[in-house]
Image: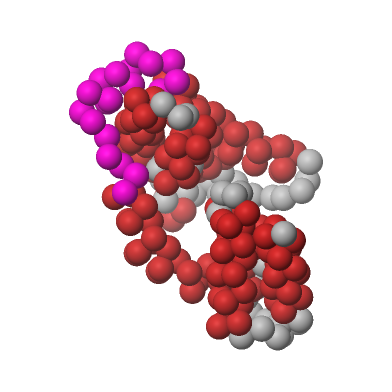
Amino acid sequence: LWLLAAAVLCAAFWALLRGRRGTAWVLWGLAVLVWICVHASGVHATVAGIVLGLLVPTRRRDGESTTPSERFEHRLHPISAGVIVPIFALSAAGIALGAASAAISEPIALGVAAALLVGKPVGIFAGARLAVGLRLSTLPPEVRWGDLLPVAILGGIGYTVSLLIARLALPDPASQEQTAAAVLIASTIAAIVAAWLLRRRPTTEERSEPL
């Protein structure tokens, strides 16, 4: 019953966005109600956010300078980055010092670190290559494949979502701590490596040869 109510509210949310008729307060209200219904149904409430995000249009209409998704992102980013993410990080980062050393030898923690340091960059880079190869997309004229590599490595910086998935997938508190330590260590390594590569890349002005 709760999920049915959430589906009806999602349909109303989508219809208002589609017709560009809903005010911000109405859309906010519907989003909160969807979250409440999904949470009350027993399904993890983050699913509500995912579904609502997928319902937001990503194409501009005639006369619009930005898409609804871009406007949502612009309005929500200060709240998300300045309030929600820090609160989640502080509440989720309780890691014992022993967990960091244990993460070096635990298979689960090593798997998480490998996924962040290798899996995500390879997936991002290979996905971009595939999209360009299939002519689904093109690189901007000033961008080379070498420029995409450090960006793909930056994708290995995982924190909030990685910790959330670890908590949902691993019931053992010790494994959760070790996984959280692995996420922090791998994210730090990814940030350092990506920063080093970005500093070594020539700027657009420094490139004299044609692309």
Residue 103 is one of the magenta-drawn residues = yes
Single out the residue that lies furthest toward the left.
Answer: 97
Query: In this rendering, would 133 be left or right of 69?
Result: right
Residue 158 is one of the magenta-drawn residues = no
Q: Give the prevailing secondary structure in the magenta stretch.
A: helix
Residue 70's quadrant in the figure? bottom right
Query: In this rendering, would 69 be left or right of 174?
Result: right
- Taking depth in this image into account, of 130 and 37 the one nearest to the observer is 37
User: Residue 119, can we see it?
Assistant: yes
Per the rendered image, the range of residues in magenta is 91-109
Please determine whether, in this image, residue 196 is positioned above or below residue 52: above
Q: Position of residue 76 (x, y in %)?
A: 48, 69
- Taking depth in this image into account, of 44 and 152 the one nearest to the observer is 44
Please determine whether, in this image, residue 33 is positioned above or below residue 110: below
- Taking depth in this image into account, of 49 and 200 the one nearest to the observer is 49
Q: Position of residue 66 (x, y in %)?
A: 62, 75
Q: Which quadrant of the figure contains the N terminus?
A: bottom right
Residue pictured at 59% horizontal, 49% vertical: 42
Residue pictured at 45% horizontal, 37% vertical: 167
Residue pictured at 20% horizontal, 28% vertical: 97
Residue pictured at 50% horizontal, 37% vertical: 168
Q: Position of residue 113 (x, y in %)?
A: 42, 26
Q: Position of residue 71 (x, y in %)?
A: 57, 74
Q: Give the image's coloring scheme.
A: secondary structure
Residue 195's quadrant in the figure? top left
